[in-house]
């Protein structure tokens, strides 16, 4: 299996070198681009033979912020999963990032091993989110009574909750004592019933109290 193509955008030299030093030495990962700003990232992007599969993007950057750049990046790289990374854990930024196409959201105090795990998870279809971030989102939006609960079985609701908690298919299977294939069948059924097309959309609608 080829290493996952990873790009990093981080303006803090110390943090950038810490991430580069750890992530770029992992056998599962290949750092194809490391930049200190969105502008530098977009400038160097055309030089890549193959685009990154995952972009670890800082939110608070000089020049264009990660949040402002996210829609532009997703337009340029629709198949790239973007993991937002920041010291901020307020729900407004998190929600805006998710609505703009972020695949996950991790805080900068997240251990390096967990950041690596988040990169691996997002490639496998997960939506990684630091537990503190997930709690912030749910507490902030205070979901109203489910609008579409009656569409889902009890087991399907358990799968939805596991996805909202940021678990990938294998982790959902372990939590619910199901096979991975069964989990994937549930996920497809849930998507069809709720008319969503991605885990990010599912998490976003849950955060708004629409599930």
Image: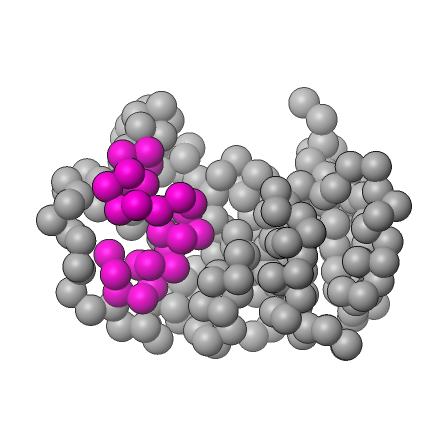
Asked if residue 194 can be seen in this view, the reply is yes
- Position of residue 159 relative to residue 20, above or below, is above
Q: Is residue 24 left or right of residue 106?
A: right
Say left or right for 35 vs 106.
right
Q: Can residue 117 be seen in this view?
A: no
Give the x, y percent position of residue 134.
40, 62
Residue under the point 31% across and 28% down: 185
Question: Is 96 within the magenta?
Answer: no
Pick the quarter of the image with the N terminus: top right
Q: Residue at x 68, y 73 (%)?
A: 65
At x 32%, y 41%, the residue is 191
Q: Does the magenta stretch include residue 209?
A: yes
Left or right, 57 with reference to 198: right
Q: Main secondary structure of the magenta part?
A: helix
Q: How many marks?
A: 0
Q: Where is residue 92 in the image (x, y as percent from the top left)?
A: 46, 76
Region of the chain picked out in magenta, as a range: 187-211
Depth check: give the residue in front, 88 or 33: 33
The single residue placed furthest to the front in the displayed view is: 75
Residue 123 place in picture, x, y as percent: 57, 39
The C terminus appears in which quarter of the rendering? Answer: bottom left
Q: Give coordinates of residue 127: x percent, y percent.
A: 47, 49
| Above/below status of 21 relative to 131 | above
Can you tell which quarter of the image residue 41 is in?
bottom right
């Amino acid at each position: 299996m080829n290493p996952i193509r990873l790009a990093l955008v981080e303006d803090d030299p110390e943090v950038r070198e810490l991430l580069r030093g750890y992530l770029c030495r992992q056998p599962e990962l290949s750092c194809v681009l490391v930049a200190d700003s969105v502008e530098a990232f977009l400038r160097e992007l055309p030089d890549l033979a193959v685009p990154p599969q995952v972009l670890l993007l800082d939110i608070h950057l000089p020049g264009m912020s990660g949040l402002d750049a996210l829609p532009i990046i997703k337009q340029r790289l629709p198949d790239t999963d973007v993991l937002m990374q920041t010291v901020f854990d307020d729900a407004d930024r998190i929600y805006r990032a998710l609505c703009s196409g972020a695949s996950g959201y991790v805080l900068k105090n997240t251990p390096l091993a967990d950041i690596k795990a988040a990169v691996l998870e997002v490639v496998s279809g997960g939506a990684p989110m630091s537990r503190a971030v997930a709690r912030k989102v749910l507490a902030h939006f205070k979901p109203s009574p489910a609008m579409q609960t009656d569409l889902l079985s009890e087991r399907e609701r358990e799968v939805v909750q596991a996805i909202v908690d940021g678990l990938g298919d294998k982790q959902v299977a372990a939590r619910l004592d199901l096979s991975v294939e069964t989990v994937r069948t549930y996920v497809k059924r849930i998507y069809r019933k709720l008319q969503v097309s991605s885990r990010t959309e599912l998490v976003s609608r849950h955060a708004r109290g629409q599930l």
